[in-house]
Image (cartoon, rainbow, N blue to C red):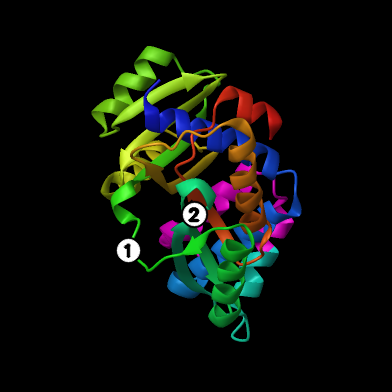
Amino acid sequence: MSGHNKWSTIKRKKGALDAKRSKAFSKIIKDIAVAVKESGSDPDSNPRLRLAISNAKGVNMPKDNIQRAISKASDKDANNYTEVSYEGYANFGVAVFVECLSDNVQRTVSNVRSYFNKYNGSLGTNGSLLFLFDRKGIFAVPQGDLVEDDFIMEIIDAGAEDVELEEGIFTITTAMEDFGSMMKKLEEMGIEPESAELQRIPKTLTKLDKDSALKVLRLIDVFEEDDDVQNVFHNLELTEEIMAEM
């Protein structure tokens, strides 16, 4: 399995655990709110909203919850969220990229800075870590009745950089600029992905011993528990030993 797909698969598995928490729903609701504010409440004419709805289904959000979120976001008095990101280093030199949706940026940056400081990390300047990550489109598609070789060939022909099948899930990787066209291709095939998102894939990984790695992961968990945080990316190598402790 290629390095970036291995990282994405680990993130997806962890995401499946995170989906048991209400935090998964709150993330989706914010995505829906931003999508509706940007381009309206009709998913047929709003690709970002279609994507948010697809991801909502992927974490088993009830249809009523999805519709309520769309209706609430359509209200003129609904919260306005700003997309912001923060970059820094955790302890032991692990790079951390934090993506947020916030209705109070001052609160968000204050919280992010305090988390870095509390766990012996440091908040950096925007753009300081871009060289360490590639932005890729990552799709998780349940195999179902799909024939492995035929599906992989068709998706590669459609522009995928890589496709891997593991434990009944195809992980499709695309260049960032091909994300929309791959989403359209899957729609044309009548396939609804379990998840579809732009991820920041580390170009190189930082390997730590188990105890040091778990200290870094405590910081990652604190970020992920913050209501303003949508995604956290890092370049810590997650070995099987470390995964077993998570």
Within-10-Å neighbours for mark 2: few <14, some 14–19, many 20+: some
167 versus 185 height, above or below: above
Residue under label 2: 50
Going 33% across and 61% down the picture, which residue do you hit? 128
Q: Amino acid at mark 2?
A: Arg
Q: Residue at x 36, y 35 (%)?
A: 173
Q: Main secondary structure of the magenta part?
A: helix
Above/below status of 238 relative to 33: above
In the picture, which quadrant includes the C terminus? Answer: top right
Query: Which residues make up the magenta segment?
Result: 42-67
Observer able to see residue 94: no
Please give the residue where the numbered disc 1 appears in the rendered image. Answer: 127
Give me the disc on residue 218: none
- Who is closer to the viewer here, 193 or 45? 193
Q: Which residue corresponds to the image point at 60% horizontal and 33% vertical from the top-left? A: 13
Q: Height in image: 207 above or below 94?
A: above
Instruction: Please tell me which of labels 2 and 1 falls first in the chain.
Output: 2
Kind of residue at badge 1: Gly
Q: Residue 118 falls in which quadrant of the image?
A: bottom right
Asked if one can make out residue 3 in the rendered structure from this viewpoint, the answer is yes
Element on which disc 2 rests: helix
